[in-house]
Image (cartoon, helix red, strand yellow):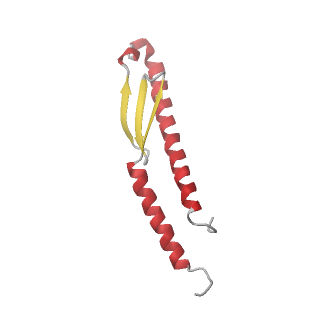
Amino acid sequence: MKGGVDINQIFRMAQQAQEKMEKEMETARVEASTGGGMVRVEMNGKKELLSLKIDPEIVKAEEIDSLQDLVLSAVNDASQQVDKLLSDKLGSMKSGLPGLF
């Protein structure tokens, strides 16, 4: 098709970009911490929690509620970091396919 847009080529490019993104997100890692580093979590790009580290100083019976809040906060922060990472990668992907988005 002369001068026109080859839709099949666009679909192939989009599929290749999606496959590349999926691979990058599988290997991506983010780390978040709360409570001045007393609770740390590591998450991959698929939002799977990979590790949880808790400073022994915070593990006291009377501070369980605080510990639970810190863990939730750290996990949620890591999840937001994955969302931002994905958004950033999608933004760069869009710039590689001008006129489509």
Q: In the picture, which quadrant includes the C terminus?
A: bottom right
| In this view, 69 is above or below 90 | above
In the displayed structure image, the side of residue 31 where residue 83 appears, left or right: right
Q: Nearer the viewer, residue 2 or 85?
A: 2
| In this view, 37 is above or below 26 | above
Residue at (39, 13) in percent of width and height: 60
Residue at (51, 73) in percent of width and height: 11
Residue at (43, 51) in percent of width and height: 25
Residue at (43, 47) in percent of width and height: 45
Q: Nearer the viewer, residue 4 or 65?
A: 4
Q: Position of residue 84 (x, y in %)?
A: 54, 45
Q: Position of residue 62 (x, y in %)?
A: 43, 12
Q: Quadrant of residue 97?
A: bottom right
Q: Position of residue 1 (x, y in %)?
A: 58, 87
| In this view, 61 is above or below 23 | above
Q: Position of residue 61 (x, y in %)?
A: 39, 13
| In this view, 30 is above or below 67 | below
Number of numbered markers: 0
